[in-house]
Image: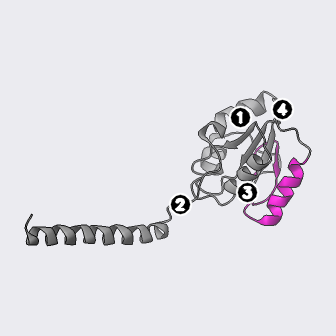
Amino acid sequence: MNNTTFRSTLLTLLMVGIFGFSQAQVLPSTGATLQKNTWTSSQLMKPETLVKMIRGGQKVKIYNIGVVQNIKGAVNMGAASEKENLKKFAQALKGLPANTALVVYCGCCPMDKCPNIRPAFQLLNDLKFKNARLLELPVNVKTDWIDKGYPLAENTK
């Protein structure tokens, strides 16, 4: 490889490196998430599954850990991104057996951007709940639950 080819290759690699770095710096402003999920795919629950459980009268504890409408049977804990609401959620869980069937949801926004589901689900993991599930609402509670006619709490409009 002659000197000119080497310089050209080095310059190209340097420019690609700089461009790649500058793109990485811009990425967060696009709204993309850098949050780490605190659940596994097996801990996600499809809305249709929860609907069947509710309509079938199955015993499941449902917690709204966001600021959206209450699903039928849900206890509203408030936004879990706020420390006082996360403490309130921890108090509500206190004394429940580790094998209790639990479902948490928010649905204020797309799951990849939601500030509430990660701290709430991390708490469930920390407390060693074995049957904890996160309701899979990829878009939001309106699109993925309400618009489908799924059951809401009586006092929800």
Work out whether mark 2 precedes mark 3 in sequence or the reverse, and give the earlier one. 2
Q: Which mark is residue 33?
A: 2
Question: Badge 1: few (under 14), some or many (20 or more) residues near its Cα, within 10 Å?
Answer: some
Q: Which amino acid type corresponds to the residue marked 4 in the rendered image? A: Lys
Q: Position of residue 76 (x, y in %)?
A: 81, 53
Work out whether mark 3 precedes mark 1 in sequence or the reverse, and give the earlier one. 1
Dot 1 corresponds to which residue?
A: 51
- Residue 35 part of the magenta segment: no
Q: Residue at x 24, y 67 (%)?
A: 13
Cα–Cα gap, marks 2 and 3: 18 Å
Q: Which mark is residue 66?
A: 3
Q: Which mark is residue 67?
A: none
Work out whether mark 1 precedes mark 4 in sequence or the reverse, and give the earlier one. 1
Dot 4 corresponds to which residue?
A: 59
Q: Check if mark 1's residue and mark 4's residue have beta carbons within 8 Å.
A: no
Q: Check if mark 3's residue and mark 1's residue have beta carbons within 8 Å.
A: no
Q: Position of residue 63 (x, y in %)?
A: 79, 48
Q: Position of residue 27 (x, y in %)?
A: 44, 66
Question: Residue 48 vs residue 73: left or right?
Answer: left
Q: Residue at x 9, y 72 (%)?
A: 4
Bounds of the magenta segment: 68-94
Is disc 4 placed on a helix, strand or loop?
A: loop
Is disc 3 placed on a helix, strand or loop?
A: loop
Cα–Cα gap, marks 3 and 1: 19 Å
